[in-house]
Image (spheres, rainbow, N blue to C red):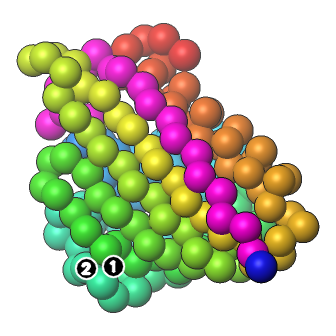
């Protein structure tokens, strides 16, 4: 039976939740967080779309996950289950490496010019023996994403 993994990452940022939401709710924002080591492709029709505008419960698009911006290492198929305007989303997707990928991100106000970003990940690898390695890699990617957010919104990292 395939094992499901869960990881949680949390950062307090010195920027309003509205400013952070505007940045993290686009594929450009995702790629800003992933860079420079990873990048995800996006079709032209979705490149300017904000999560607040995205349809729910239907596949949005497929994206190549590129190592160094060049080498394909995964193919991710995006689907959003829920979006709470200005506050968060629930992505329920699949990829070549993940039978199921759930990513819940919340952006909660913490005062007038601060917020807390929390990422909750639940994933089931397609190949069970790869689970521990994928959990370490995904953990490193999300720690890096949160460090990039801290650099961008607090000047720390």
Q: Position of 79 compared to 75: left or right?
A: left
* Quarter of the image that includes the C terminus: top right
Pick whichever of labels 2 and 1 is earlier in the sequence: 1
Q: Residues within 10 Å of mark 2 (few under 14, many from 20)?
A: some
For residue 56, the mark is: 2
At which x and y percent is residue 3? 73, 67
At which x and y percent is residue 6? 59, 52
In this rendering, is residue 129 above or below 18? below
Q: Tell me if residue 96 is in the magenta stretch.
A: no
| Contact, mark 2 vs mark 1 (Cβ under 8 Å) | no
At which x and y percent is residue 43? 45, 77
Residues 66 and 107: in front is 107
In this rendering, is residue 7 above or below 116? below
Q: Which residue is mark 1?
A: 45
Q: Calculate the distance from the C-alpha at mark 2 to the C-alpha at mark 1.
A: 16 Å
User: What residue is at 26 percent from the left and 39 percent from the top?
Assistant: 107
The furthest residue to the bottom: 58
Range of the magenta residues? Answer: 2-20
Q: Position of 25 compared to 128: left or right?
A: left
């Amino acid at each position: 039976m395939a094992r499901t993994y869960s990881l949680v990452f949390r950062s307090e940022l010195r920027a309003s939740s509205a400013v952070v939401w505007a940045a993290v709710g686009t594929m450009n924002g995702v790629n800003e967080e992933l860079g420079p080591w990873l990048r995800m492709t996006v079709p032209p029709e979705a490149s300017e779309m904000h999560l607040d505008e995205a349809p729910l419960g239907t596949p949005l698009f497929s994206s190549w996950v590129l190592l160094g911006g060049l080498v394909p290492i995964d193919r991710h198929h995006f689907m959003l289950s829920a979006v709470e305007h200005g506050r968060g989303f629930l992505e329920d997707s699949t990829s070549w490496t993940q039978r199921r990928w759930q990513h819940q991100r919340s952006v909660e106000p913490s005062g007038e010019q601060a917020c807390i970003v929390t990422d909750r990940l639940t994933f089931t690898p397609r190949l069970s023996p790869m689970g521990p390695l994928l959990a370490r890699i995904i953990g490193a990617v999300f720690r890096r994403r949160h460090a990039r957010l801290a650099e961008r919104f607090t000047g720390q990292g």
